[in-house]
Amino acid sequence: MNDSGNDLHGSVEALLREDRIPHIWCPGCGLGSVLHSFLTALIKSGIDTQKVAVVSGIGCTGRTAGYVKLDSFHTTHGRAIPFATGLKLANPELKVILFSGDGDLAAIGGNHLIHAARRNMDLTVICVNNFNYGMTGGQVAPTTPISGRTSTSPYGNFEFPFNLPYLVSAAGAVYVARWTSLDARRLEKAIMEALDKRGFSFVEAIAPCPTQYGRKNKQPTGLAQLDYYRTASVIKHGADPKDVGIDLNGPITVGKFVDIERPTFSDMRADTLQKAFAPKPKKEAAGAKAQ
Amino acid sequence: MSKNAPLEGEFFMNGDNACAEGAISAGCRFFAGYPITPATEVAERMAERLPEVGGTFIQMEDEIASMAAILGGSWAGVRSMTSTSGPGFSLMMENIGLGAMTETPCVVVNVQRAGPSTGLPTLTAQGDMMQARWGSHGLYAIIALAPSSPQEMFDLAIKAFNLSERYRTPVFIMADESVGHMSEKVVIPSPEEIAVFPRRKPAVPPGKYKPFQPDADLVPPMASAGEGYNFHVTGLTHDEKGYPVMTAEAQHKLVKRLLDKIDLNKDEIIELEEDGIKGAEVVVCSYGISARVAKLAIKSAREEGVKVGLLRLITVWPFPDRRIRELAGKIKAFVVPELNAGQIALEVERCAGGAAQTILVPHMGGAVHEPRTILEAIRKAAR
């Protein structure tokens, strides 16, 4: 990095809890890189960081909340989205950002994910997808590609995975993008756009888990996984989300897939209540008309 | 009545509605819930009333989400509540633990129905009393109140919010279907007459604030998100800064305080109703609808000449150990009618420690006791 990334280095550090370093993430893990993209995007967006709350669930990605020097909440497994919903609704001035993993958001938290998208809740979700449960030792996830090996799919995964951009766009997300952690700049730009978007925005960040998923699937180092991303990534802005599923070692379609306008939960609520509480026309006038 | 203020005056309303009004009078301005019989009316009332007083209602996708959402609402600085019944209470348990661990003030209303499982959705029971104390995993203390009337649904909603702020803990209102659906006169005082315990805010600037550093009474002041404190909150075992610490020492220090902040303040928390205890040879110890039914049996027993008193538990958790022990030394027996197979009776028996007999009057739920069954137990106890 030789431009604004370096200029922002000090600012990024200021948003990290350096007294919590060393972090728990493995060598070669993609989380540090995605976190850097997020914090850079946050700084560049100009959002008042004192009004930002970061909410995570459980897992390696869930630990992110503990490393950012912002109001941050490390909640229960799968429940980051409803917790964030409460934060946002009780104080609409807050910018509430979810930073969590694929297992947390799409398996145990899958119901909350689709309902927040349906409501178009004003939340930004950064979903780090490493295709498995890293923290617990690399088990099969709802994102593991067919034939992917994990400790609970030792003969190869035979469950069809979720295509997350397709899932959230079908449920109602207004902004959906996917990049790999290798594409740090494009990921950063997507996160900036997501932060700027009113409503439910979703950025999927594909990231290496060499210790667990990579090792079991012939990409035993972070570098090997990044090399796969380099050769397999295909940029296709505006691709139909239904076509962006990921096969084992297959192409990874990246880009911005959805960027639409739709009233948010708060818009719809305010509009409905405004109508409901508007002064009613006088009764006698209505009666006269009926005659 | 003003559309923009809490109600005031005399009303005829059911317990569920009274509970919602009590919450509003206590300053609750965020409610997240999920429909479930026999608690639905609490949510319905909040859906209608909260927008009138500038609050926010949301019907979540399930009770897990409802509980998570009110924790979020509370950390945004807004008094928050949810309501449910047995099956939903079970689903809320994990995030109730998060609320206990992160010391998040909030109120959970459980209008109990008969279980296990789907049980008798429309019919009364008191089968969740032990679940209220122990339902989430690990070690924590909790506060639970048991209303006996619609008026008390109102009054205890206010008390529940005040206790939750005072001790930074989830507080349960353990109602039952009978009380939730019963309609009676409810007197709502003017806002000036209602004491509301304010959230204890940090007295130090952001750089010095440790979100889990307790005051002398073991309760830490609480900042809200967006106030510039940049605090971290986690369900992991943590130190006073809120940072995870994975050691037995940190676990002991934190969890011991979570238990002590309730246990050592029992005298301030516990509220009991006592009637005719002095000189009694038998004391009926009960709560909720069962205590009300017991009053009829007590009246009959007194007419027969039995010296019988009533000890009604308004606060069920923390349990009034000391009062039960005191009484045990003076009476022959406790009679404990409850709509379960013996939950609070076990606590009474434990505290009595053999000094007085404990006679359970069980009922599997679906209806209230016949007063006769309680009367017979009183007679037996007096023998």
Image (cartoon, rainbow, N blue to C red):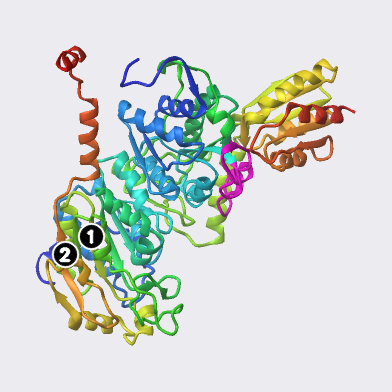
- The N terminus of chain B, quarter of image: top left
Residue at (35, 84) in percent of width and height:
A217
SS label for mark 1: helix
Residue B305, how many percent across, how many down? Answer: 85, 17
Residue range of the region highlighted in magenta in the rendering? B114-143
Mark 1 to mark 2 CA distance (whole Å): 9 Å
Residue A211, how many percent across, how many down? Answer: 38, 79
Check disc 2 and give the amino acid type.
Answer: Phe
| Residue B153 seen from this side | yes
Was residue B190 drawn as part of the magenta stretch in this picture?
no
Residue A106, how many percent across, how many down? Answer: 35, 63
Task: Give the image quarter of residue A146.
Answer: bottom left
B80 over A278 or under it: above or below:
below
A40 over A152 or under it: above or below:
above
Was residue B123 drawn as part of the magenta stretch in this picture?
yes
Q: On residue A169, which mark appears?
A: 1
Residue at (30, 41) in percent of width and height:
A89
Q: Which residue is mark 2?
A: A257
Check disc 1 and give the amino acid type.
Answer: Ser
